[in-house]
Image (tube, rainbow, N blue to C red):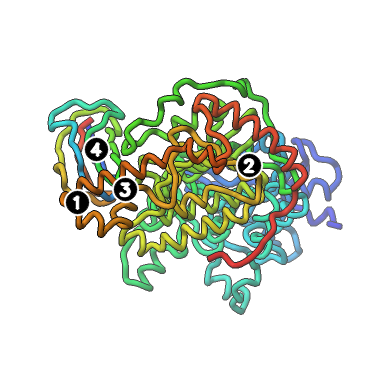
Amino acid sequence: MLDRDLIPREMEGAGSGDSGSGDANIDEIHHRRRMAEKMGGEEAVQRQHDAGRLTVRERIAKLTDQKSFREVGTLAGSGEYDESHRLLNVKPAPYVAGLARIDGRPVAIGGEDFTVRGGTSFGALRRKGGQGGFIEDLAHHYRIPLVNLVDGAGGTVTSAKRRGYVVFPGVDGFERSVELLGEVPVVSAVMGTAAGGPAGRAILSHFSLMVRGTSQIFAAGPPVVKRSLGQDIDKEELGGARVAVDKAGTIHNAVDTEEEAFEQIRRFLSYMPQNVWDLPPVTDTSDPVDRCEDALASIVPEKRTQPYDMKTLLGHVVDAESIFELQPTHGKAVITALARLGGRPVGVIANNPKVYGGAMDADAARKQIHFMELCDTFHIPLIFFVDVPGFMVGLKAEEEATLREGMRAVYVAGQLSVPTITLVIRKCYGMAGMATCNKNDIDLKLAWPTGEWGSLPVEGGVAAAFRREIASAPDPKTREKELEAELRAYASPFRTAEAFAVEEIIDPRETRPVLCEFIALAEGRVSADLGPRRKAGVSP
Amino acid sequence: MATISVKSEVTGSVWKVEKAVGDQVAKGETIMILESMKMEIPVDAPEAGTLKELKVAPEEPVEEEQELCLIET
């Protein structure tokens, strides 16, 4: 209870509107709320805006459904009192958190308030956000998606002075963050400069994104790099989207504006169930499930060495406007996208013949692994559009551990329990080809008549297997070509279909109706198989 | 007027150059074809403009991220 005499005069008349409630305690709530809404003060908010960034409160308001934000922890902060214990001011905690709705569905949402001490941690009994923060408990206990709006650099050495001791790593551990990855969708948007804990927290998510030009992420920023390695590098060069998204794949998607980031978060969540015990949401679509597309009959060039546009191909098959690509600028030999068929979410994994003929390199393997695990966790059926000549070859590929990363993809594919359809568009060779099947499921392998497969493509294989015969021929080049032509005759997909080693060869034009039918059927199977994904074994 | 640098997405070699310096190119039009992993990889103009300079010639090996040509928009 607060003695009415202790309330500062300007609070008189405070309330939800302009008029006071007449109750000092209630008035105090509203007074304190207003102080929280001021964040780090006018100047600090102006600095945030001048840097081209919104405040965390503006971000939450723009991302979530109108008036849906129910804040939790509004009053947390550091209070200042005079000698007679009158409240002078409360400096809000540098983290804003609560519940809200996105497209009508509840989420837990929170983010560092950079205007308050740069979003660094503050000395409270309980953390509001970040790893081990209350926001994670909200998502865990209510089984709702978590949205992290990351804008902070984590710990500061000055806090040691305040506490009188240094904190042991892991006191606020990542255990809950890790647990959430198997329970509810977790999205992290890096909206400013993230280093240390917040940077690590951003990575522990199903989908992460950052804004080109105004956000950066790294294990440690330029001053630490300068001190440790003597390198002079600015924060954009070190951890801007060019490095973190395009090159490294540390963060999944890059966007140009904060508004676009909110759009992508809403989009990602629209494909996701609320948790692993729920079915993915089915939406209405005006795109007929029996739509046949003539363009598909001729999209794959007759000449085997000519690529085609896989994204155009996918666009002809899935529901109109339903493709949402993850990591479009990284590991481009494979395309990973959420999409819909007959309104049902599906995960699409398609090799891109325009990038190294679709050969799987280490980046593409890691990208495919994450996407397979994402869809498996949230019971979103997978469709592989296969055109893979094998693992990437060459010195660079070996140095990047392509074989190991590629086999990790095979390992993860071998543990999938979500319904999977394999559709061979053109090439399906070797071990990379094996990473496109899931024999735990019905193991349905469909193919277009342009499909071809085997342990390895005829070209390289002939030179190796018939080396002596070719070398001793009067005209080795001609002999090699003859052998290739001879073996290619056996490579007709129809011969494999005769042996029932692919289950069906389909007319490319009927791809959408066929896939829509199998995906609709998969729902019965998925609904009988909900819950957390099993964990097993040691990933290679 | 801006100059755009067109870079190779792959390691391989130049197979055919389809445009000459001074030619107009439309957005998405093929400027040259590389060969990599036994595939013909087209290099398309990211924007419409004039081909200002070619940095590579047929049969020359190219590295990922190597500059192939400049387009003036």
Q: Which residue is mark 3?
A: A459
Which quarter of the figure is the C terminus of chain B placed in?
Answer: top left
The image position of residue A146, as x and y in percent, is 66, 49
Q: Which residue is mark 4?
A: B33
Q: Nearer the viewer, residue A256 or A20?
A: A256
The image position of residue A255, as x and y in percent, is 46, 41
Report the amino acid beneath label 1. Answer: Pro
How far separated are the C-alphas under marks 1 and 2?
49 Å
Q: Which residue is mark 1?
A: A476
Report the amino acid beneath label 4. Answer: Ile
Using the image, determine if residue A311 lies above or below residue A536. Answer: above
Using the image, determine if residue A158 lies above or below residue B2. Answer: below
The image position of residue A266, as x and y in percent, is 60, 38
Q: Nearer the viewer, residue A487 or B45?
A: A487
Foreground tag (3 vs 1): 1
Dot label at residue A381: 2
Report the amino acid beneath label 2. Answer: Pro
